[in-house]
Amino acid sequence: MIFANHAHVFPKELRPEGSVDSLMRLMDDCDIDKAVAFAPFADRFHEGGFSGSPNDWLASQIKGNDRLVGFGTVDFTADLGDEVERIASLGFKGIKLHPPYQDFVIDGEEAFKVYEKAQELGLFVSFHSGMHWNRLKKSNVLLFDEVAWSFPDLKFSLEHIGGYHFFKDALAVMCNNSRRGNNIYAGWTSIRNRDGMGGWSLTDEQLETVIFQTGEEHSIFGLDFPYAKAADIKWDIERIKRLSLNSECKENILGATLQRVLFG
């Protein structure tokens, strides 16, 4: 079974190629059984002319769909505690946070309110990690170490594993907390390097190093839908299958670990 993290979905009127129906077609094309769907960020949702909560919208779109698992997003202009409680009340299993895009400081006071409530409610957090055209001092990957130390029971993933520019920092954060609950996961999202080393590309050696240093149960495959297309995702899956890792490890990366993290 392939159970993938990290699919951004949008109303079809806002982004047709990012709709729930488009995601389902891509999953069928790529032989993906289940996926985590992220609600749109509030600014994109409202700028597109939609009212209400993007989390409520996502809940309505995936209701009764046993192949999609919902993750909410947080509007940092709203009451943060209420935002996180609403995400949990909708039956979502986690939250997607993007520090540079949402323009918050990883170890800032407002963000800590979100982490505290997420830890209390047992929600998993998928963080964007790595460069994304904002001040690096606000989203420096090493700041995730402060999150782990301050919220030792919070489970979270570092999506893109820091990317090309911050890979070693992401790996350092994971290894530094491996004896303190070991609740940080490497998000194998946009890892492809078939067209040369881009901003998110990682080498086979780097990916295998993640496993050797953090273990076989702390890596999670992600799609980055709709920014990654079916051909990209098929290539990523086949690449993982070709790595010098045992079959159980590959099964963990491609879904078994995510299943355990979200459902026990």
Image (cartoon, grey):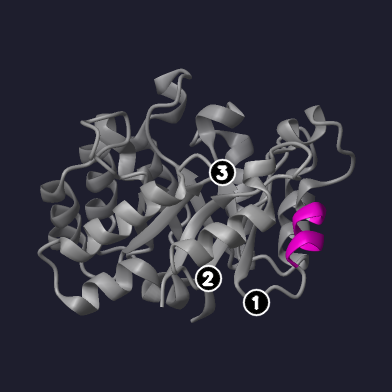
174 lies left or right of 68: left
Q: Quadrant of residue 257?
A: bottom left
Q: Which residue is mark 1?
A: 66
Q: Residues within 10 Å of mark 2 (few under 14, many from 20)?
A: many
Mark 2 and mark 1 in contact? Answer it, CB < 8 Å. yes
Instruction: Give the amino acid at mark 2.
Output: Lys
Residue in view at x 60 percent, y 31 percent: 102
Q: Which residue is mark 2?
A: 34
Name the spot of residue 55 as percent of width and height, x first: 76, 52
Q: Answer whether residue 57 is magenta in the image.
A: yes
Q: Residues within 10 Å of mark 1 (few under 14, many from 20)?
A: few
Q: Is residue 170 visible?
A: yes
83 lies left or right of 92: right
Residue in view at x 22 percent, y 54 percent: 175
Q: Answer whether residue 50 is magenta in the image.
A: no
Give the number of callouts.
3
Q: Which residue is mark 3?
A: 97
- Height in image: 29 above or below 129? below
Instruction: Give the amino acid at mark 1.
Output: Asp
- Height in image: 228 above or below 237? above
Instruction: Give the amino acid at mark 3.
Output: Leu
**Numbered disc 2: secondary structure:** strand
Q: Which residues are magenta?
A: 56-62
Q: Which comes before the other along the chain, label 2 or label 1?
A: 2
Name the spot of residue 90 as percent of width and height, x first: 77, 65
**Numbered disc 1: secondary structure:** loop
84 lies left or right of 240: right
- The residue furthest right is 51
